[in-house]
Image (cartoon, rainbow, N blue to C red):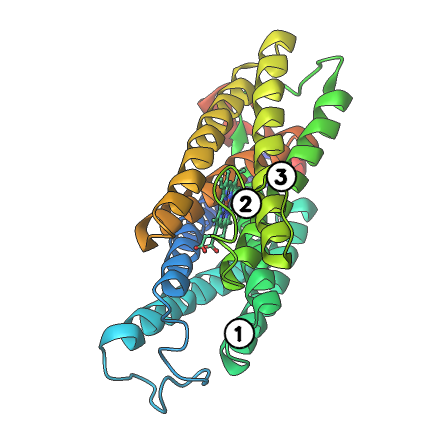
Amino acid sequence: MTFVDKIFYNQTAKKQSEKGGELILIKRVALLSIAITYVLIVFGGFVASSESGMGCGPEWPLCNGDVIPEMKGETLIEFAHRVIGFVLAVMSIILFIVIKKSGVHQKLKNAGRLMISLLAIQIIAGALVVLFDLPTIIVTFHLLVAMVFLFALLWIYRLSMPKRSRQSTHTQMGKLKTNIILLLVMIFITIGFGAYIKHQHYGIACGWLDCGNTLLPVTEAQIFQTIHRLLAVITAIYTILLTVWVGKSKYGKRIMKRFLLAAFIIFIQLFSGVITILTTISISWAVVHLALATALFMIVADIFILVMFDAPLFHVTSKKQIDEQPLSRI
Ligand code: HEM
């Protein structure tokens, strides 16, 4: 190796290890942000179920006229939700800056842009929720944006990870892609209807099986509640059928494990929905119901990312190879 080669080699190796370090940082911050977002969504459900949403009054960013309010009752609950939201916003901005400065792959930058735009929308929606005294449409929108935000973080996380298996060469990848898009959309819509009936207080307009004297809904509240239940059952059957099909079609362990988990969660989710109604919407069951819905969305979103984007930027077969990737791949 000549002197010039050595310098070039050292510089390339240095740049590569810097990029590797940045990717590890992105991965860690993304993972932490995913965990905080999950907690924030579920805690948001608790804020709504305990009717603490106006605990800071119709004010934002101040809380009852103060930066730090008197910590008690519903004020404490709503303020805690805002503090977690603030921590998440700071983390997301840091994540965005690291991605932008690192000059890593374009896909990662796109995911970063999506994430930060959703954060901005979410902050505005959160403010509108309190300023306009919890309008159902905006609260529902707020939850749905939170789900897409979670999706963007998952995408960033997956893009910053090394891939240990080769690109899938399964002949029916197109079929799986179509099904996973449909499943994710169905879960998303079911979540939207769930949030809508919750905030309209339509939750017990019908029982878990029928609507009073009849199976068919009549009033608006009954219709919306029934759509949520029906969509949920159709989505659950679809998930279980897909899981069986994926198992038979041998799409690989990574996909199979996630489908099995999704099928398991949706099965418990149906029960939690029934119990939520039977307990005339007990706060704890309503929160469990949201926690499971969010977990379900995350798992299916993760399958979506793996299947649609074949996410990770690196193609490696062993841990050692992560450090040996040519810069051009990064
Ligand atoms: C795929 C399955 C399901 C998903 C993804 C799902 C999702 C959701 C979500 C996200 C909410 C709003 C929670 C919140 O904002 O705190 C909700 C509310 C609700 N869901 Fe479901 N759900 C499913 C199945 C069911 C089933 C099978 C039933 C009834 C048999 C049911 C009954 C309810 C009720 C009554 C509410 C309102 C709870 C409240 O007022 O706090 N859900 N659902």
Label located before the other in sequence (1 or 2) = 1
Q: Secondary structure at mark 2?
A: loop
How far is disc 3 from disc 1 in space, using C-alphas?
26 Å
The answer to whether residue 318 is above or below residue 204 is: above
For image coordinates 48% across by 40% down, the residue present is 208
Residue sitting at the far bottom: 65
Q: Secondary structure at mark 1?
A: helix
Front residue of 324 and 110: 110
Q: Quadrant of the image for the C terminus?
A: top right
Q: Is mark 3 within 8 Å of ligand 1?
A: yes
Residue 313 can be seen, yes or no: no
Residue at left 51%, top 73%? 134
Which residue is identified by label 2? Answer: 211
Give, as a three-letter code, the residue at label 1: Val
The residue singled out by tag 3 in the image is: 231
Classify residue 280 as left or right of residue 235: left
User: Crowdedness of circle 1 by 10 Å Cα count: few (<14), some, many (20+)?
Assistant: many
Which residue type carries mark 2? Cys
- Asked if the residues shown at circle 3 and circle 1 are in contact, with their CB atoms under 8 angstroms apart, the answer is no
**Kind of residue at badge 3:** Leu
Mark positioned earlier in the residue sequence (2 or 3): 2
Q: Are there few (<14), some (14-19), or many (20+) residues within 10 Å of tag 2? A: some
Rendered image quadrant of residue 52: bottom left
For disc 1, the marked residue is 129
Q: From the image, state whether disc 3 or disc 1 is nearer to you.
A: 3
Mark yes or no: residue 272 visible: yes
Residue 47 at x, y percent in the picture? 37, 64
| Closer to the camera in the image, 110 or 198 | 198
Q: Nearer the viewer, residue 278 or 234?
A: 278
Q: CA distance from mark 2 to mark 3?
A: 16 Å
Give the residue at x 52% y 15%: 253
For residue 16, above or below residue 83: above
